[in-house]
Amino acid sequence: MRVDSIIRRVSCLAVAGAIAAGFGGAAAAEGLYAGVGGGFFVPRDSEVKGQATAAFPTPVDATSKADRGIAFSGAVGYRIADGLRVEGELSYRKNDFDTITVREPGGLAVLLPANLRTNPVALAGLRRTSDLEGDLRLLTLMANFFYDIDLGLDFEPYVGGGIGLSRISVKASVAGRTTADDDDTVLAYQFGGGLGYRVGGTDDRPVTISLDYRYFATEDPTFKGALTGTPFDAEIGGSYFGIGLRFAL
């Protein structure tokens, strides 16, 4: 995902939040709050693109799949008048890999014996779906903006999103050979919403439990292949489903 595309999406989100702020009544009292959350992160398929080199003149072109993984977060924020919340969030996501489908092996030809790395029949044998072992881990720091829509009930929907930085670490192996063991730091963004329900506290210090959804994605990180050192890019994104707890400080 290109940086300009990320900025455009967050800008659209800010406009949507401003429009939403024109509706609804008075929100809960302003002030500091803290929150924690946890749930599942369901990644989308990742397009993997590796560069061509003199030794391997065709680029890597593949799609990797990962299993549903865990996600946890903690946040500290401030509730502003009229339902707007601004917060800093630290989150962690981890997904185990499942398979990789290779359309063009490129540098993955190094998995073959040296005398077969240019053999068309042997290269064709790499163009298949194989088990992919290892995992993808993300540590992300974000600035979030949310708008609570006051319906005059204990239930309170909200919408919003954020932008920040994500440290992405990948460790992957095919057929017992490590193909990637690297990390990169890139821009990240998310948007979504949820439904909060007040479970305790007072009007000035409410305690709210929430059902949360986020679509999360990053700029494409660049990693170095463990076998050849050749750089490759990978798409990172998916959907988070979880439960959160917020309480006034």
Image: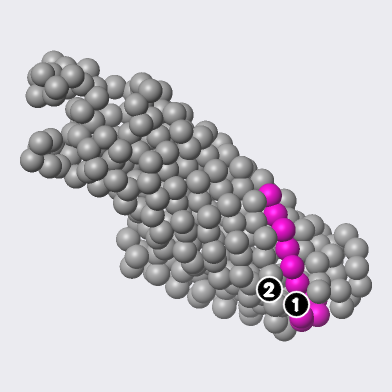
Name the quadrant of the N terminus: bottom left
Answer yes or no: is residue 245 visible.
yes
Q: Are marks 1 and 2 in contact (CB under 8 Å)?
A: yes
Dot 2 amino acid type: Gly
Rounded to the nearest angstrom, the CA distance separating label 1 from label 2 is 6 Å
Snapshot quadrant of residue 90: bottom right
Q: Residue 126: percent from the left, percent from the top? A: 24, 22
Question: SS for tag 2?
Answer: strand
Is residue 32 inside the magenta stretch?
Answer: yes
Which residue is rendered at x = 66% and y = 46% of the image? 39
| 14 to 165, vertically: above or below | below
Neighbours of disc 1 within 10 Å: few (<14), some (14-19), many (20+): some
Residues rendered magenta in the picture: 28-38
Which residue is under mark 2? 77
> In this orientation, does residue 16 appear?
no
Name the residue nearer the viewer: 61 or 19.
61
